[in-house]
Image (cartoon, rainbow, N blue to C red):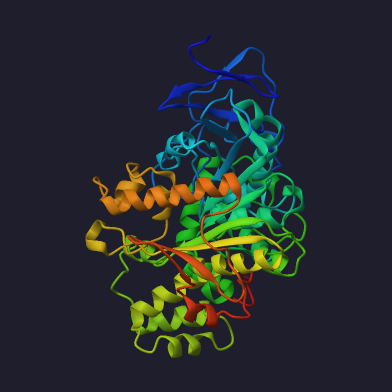
C-alpha cells in the first residue's frame, strides 16, 4: 500500500498526505484558471490530467483587495481542498466551507479553517477558493455578473461528482460560511443553478451586501475610469495585471466616503464591488425570495455575535471616539426608513453615541440580516436553528466583546490559529475550550442529522441558543432591534435611494 493516499477524481488521480489522524488533499482544480480569454468569464470545467497529480500544497490565493501586503502568486486560483477522516470510508457527512471575507478575500489556506478537529469527528471538510473583488464582482457590460457565486457553484458541482471517492456522501452536503461567506450561502439558497447541490446550510454573521444593477454599473464605471480604462468592460480590463487591479480596488474602497451623497449606504461598507441583484444569476435578495416562497427552505444553522461591529471599531481605532454626529449619521443612513432613527432612540433611551453607533451598525450589517434569514427560511418551509454568541473575547481586557469572527475558530476548533490567538489569546481559557467543543458538536450534529441540538426557530417563540460560559436556550436576545426592523428586510444598495 502506498505511503501517501491516492484518490481518482473525474479529472484524474490526486495524491494527498496523512496528518493528525486524517487525510488531506490540497490545491485540486475545480475549474480552469480564469485568466487570458477566460478572465471575467464563467468558470470553465477543469482540464483532465494523466498520471498522478500531487495534492499536498494549497493552490494560489486569488488576488485580494485588502490593505495588507500579499505577494502575487500563480493564477490557478479556482482550487479546493479536502480533509477526510478516511478516503476509504463511505457515506460521511460533508461540509463545504466558503472562506470569503467582505467579498474582498478568499483564502482557503487560512489556518483558521484547518479541518483536523471536524475530520476527527467524522466530517469530510472541503474548503474552496473563488474569485472576489473586481475579478469576482465587478459589474461589467460584457461579462456574467456575480462570477464569485458561479465559482462557488462550480465547486459544489465538483463535490457532487467526486466527494464519494473521498468517503463523503453527496446527498449529505452542508454549505457554510461566515460574513461574506455566509452572504454567499444565503445567495446560494435562492439561486436555481445551485439547487440540488447541497442539503443543509450554515451561515454565521450574514451581511446584507447587495447592489442594484443601476448602482453597480455606476460604481464599476467610476472604478474603470480610475484605472484609465476605456469602458467598464472585461475587454478593457483584461490586460490589467490582476494583483494591480486588486490593489487599485483597495485604494478605491478606502475613498468610498467621498461618494456618500450619491452612493448612500454602500459607502459605509468598505466594499464597492459586492453581489448584484442582476435578475438572472441572483434574481433577488434572499429574504424576500424565501419569505415569498420563490425559493425553498432548507435545514439552516444561522446566527451572529452580540457585538458584531466591535471588531471593526477597535481595529480601525474608532472605538471610544464616536460622537453624537456619528450616531446621527449612522441612524439616518442605516436604520430602517422612515422612522427607524426615532425608534432606536426610543428603544435605547439611555444609550450614548457609542452604543447607538455600535448597535445600529451591528444590526444593519449582520444581526438583522442573520435573524431575518432564519425567519425567511422557516417561512419557506425550512427548519432554522438560530444562535447568538455572547461570550466575551478575553484579549485586550475584554474590549472586543463578543465580536465578529470570534465564533469561527471556536467552531473549527482552531484556537491556536493566528485569528484564534488574536481574539482568544495564546493560552485559551477553559471557558473557550468548552465553548469551542459545544459549538463544534452542534456543527457536527447539524451536518450529520440536520438538528443543531436546540429547539428550532418558531414565529411565536424565536428561541435562540445563547452561546456563553454557560449556554442557554432563550427567546431571541435582541428583541428591541428585532421590533425596530419588523416589516423591513435588508434592501439592495441603490445610488438614488441610499
Question: Where does residue 47 sit, x and y in percent of width and height?
Answer: 69, 25
How many numbered marks are there? 0
In the image, residue 285 above or below residue 51: below
Q: Which of 492 and 26 lies nearest the eye of the viewer?
A: 26
Would residue 270 be found to the left or right of residue 317 on screen? right
Would you identify the image quadrant in which residue 170 lies? Answer: top right
Q: In which quarter of the image is the C terminus?
A: bottom right
Would you identify the image quadrant in which residue 53 lies? Answer: top right
Would residue 99 be seen by someone viewing this image from the given angle?
no
Question: Where does residue 127 sit, x and y in percent of width and height?
Answer: 54, 39
**Residue at screen point 74% across, 60% down:** 295
Q: Residue most toward the top?
A: 1
Would you identify the image quadrant in which residue 310 lies? Answer: bottom left
**Residue at screen point 30% across, 52% down:** 424
Would residue 49 be found to the left or right of residue 204 on screen? right
Would residue 470 be found to the left or right of residue 47 on screen? left
In the image, residue 22 above or below residue 135: above
Q: Which of 327 and 89 lies nearest the eye of the viewer?
A: 89
Q: Which of 284 and 4 lies nearest the eye of the viewer?
A: 4
Question: Where does residue 225 sit, x and y in percent of width and height?
Answer: 60, 57
Would residue 364 be seen by someone viewing this image from the given angle?
yes
Question: Where does residue 126 sit, x and y in percent of width and height?
Answer: 56, 37
In the image, residue 322 above or below residue 105: below
Amino acid at each position: 500500500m502506498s505511503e501517501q493516499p491516492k484518490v481518482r477524481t473525474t479529472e484524474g488521480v490526486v495524491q494527498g498526505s496523512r496528518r493528525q489522524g486524517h487525510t488531506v488533499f490540497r490545491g485540486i482544480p475545480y475549474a480552469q484558471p480564469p485568466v487570458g480569454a477566460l478572465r471575467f468569464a464563467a468558470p470553465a470545467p477543469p482540464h483532465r490530467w494523466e498520471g498522478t497529480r500531487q495534492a499536498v500544497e494549497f493552490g494560489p490565493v486569488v488576488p485580494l483587495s485588502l490593505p495588507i501586503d500579499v505577494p502575487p502568486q500563480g493564477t490557478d486560483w479556482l482550487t479546493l481542498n479536502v480533509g477526510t477522516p478516511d478516503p476509504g470510508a463511505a457515506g460521511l457527512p460533508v461540509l463545504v466551507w466558503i472562506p470569503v471575507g467582505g467579498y474582498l478575500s478568499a483564502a482557503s489556506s487560512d489556518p483558521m479553517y484547518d479541518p483536523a478537529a471536524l475530520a476527527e469527528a467524522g466530517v469530510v471538510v472541503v474548503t474552496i477558493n473563488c474569485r472576489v473583488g473586481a475579478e469576482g464582482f465587478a459589474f461589467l457590460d460584457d461579462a456574467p455578473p456575480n462570477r464569485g457565486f458561479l465559482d462557488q457553484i462550480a465547486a459544489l458541482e465538483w463535490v457532487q461528482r467526486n466527494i464519494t471517492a473521498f468517503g463523503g456522501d453527496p446527498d449529505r452536503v452542508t454549505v457554510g460560511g461566515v460574513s461574506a461567506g455566509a452572504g454567499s450561502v444565503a445567495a446560494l439558497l435562492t439561486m436555481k443553478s445551485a439547487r440540488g447541490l447541497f442539503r443543509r446550510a450554515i451561515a454565521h454573521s450574514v451581511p446584507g451586501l447587495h447592489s442594484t444593477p443601476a448602482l453597480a454599473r455606476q460604481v464599476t464605471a467610476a472604478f474603470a475610469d480610475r484605472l484609465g480604462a476605456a469602458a467598464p468592460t472585461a475587454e478593457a480590463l483584461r490586460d490589467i495585471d490582476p494583483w494591480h487591479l486588486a490593489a487599485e480596488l483597495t485604494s478605491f474602497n478606502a475613498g468610498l466616503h467621498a461618494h456618500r451623497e450619491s452612493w448612500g449606504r454602500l459607502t459605509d461598507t468598505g466594499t464597492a464591488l459586492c453581489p448584484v441583484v442582476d435578475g438572472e444569476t441572483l434574481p433577488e435578495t434572499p429574504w424576500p425570495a424565501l419569505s415569498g416562497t420563490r425559493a425553498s427552505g432548507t435545514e439552516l444553522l444561522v446566527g451572529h455575535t452580540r457585538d458584531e461591529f466591535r471588531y471593526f471599531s477597535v481595529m480601525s481605532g474608532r472605538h471610544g471616539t464616536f460622537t453624537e454626529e456619528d450616531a446621527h449619521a449612522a441612524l439616518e443612513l442605516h436604520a430602517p426608513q422612515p422612522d427607524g432613527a426615532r425608534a432606536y432612540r426610543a428603544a435605547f433611551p439611555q444609550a450614548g453615541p457609542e452604543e447607538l453607533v455600535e448597535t445600529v451598525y451591528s444590526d444593519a450589517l449582520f444581526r438583522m440580516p442573520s435573524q431575518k434569514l432564519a425567519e425567511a427560511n422557516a417561512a419557506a418551509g425550512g427548519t432554522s436553528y438560530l444562535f447568538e454568541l455572547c461570550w466575551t473575547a478575553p484579549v485586550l481586557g475584554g474590549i472586543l466583546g463578543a465580536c465578529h469572527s470570534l465564533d469561527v475558530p471556536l467552531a473549527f476548533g482552531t484556537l491556536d490559529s493566528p485569528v484564534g490567538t488574536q481574539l482568544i489569546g495564546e493560552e485559551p481559557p477553559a471557558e473557550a475550550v468548552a465553548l469551542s467543543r459545544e459549538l463544534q458538536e452542534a456543527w457536527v450534529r447539524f451536518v450529520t442529522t440536520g438538528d443543531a441540538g436546540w429547539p428550532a426557530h418558531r414565529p411565536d417563540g424565536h428561541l435562540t441558543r445563547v452561546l456563553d460560559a454557560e449556554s442557554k436556550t432563550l427567546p431571541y436576545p435582541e428583541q428591541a432591534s428585532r421590533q425596530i426592523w419588523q416589516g423591513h428586510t435588508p434592501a439592495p444598495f441603490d445610488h438614488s435611494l441610499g
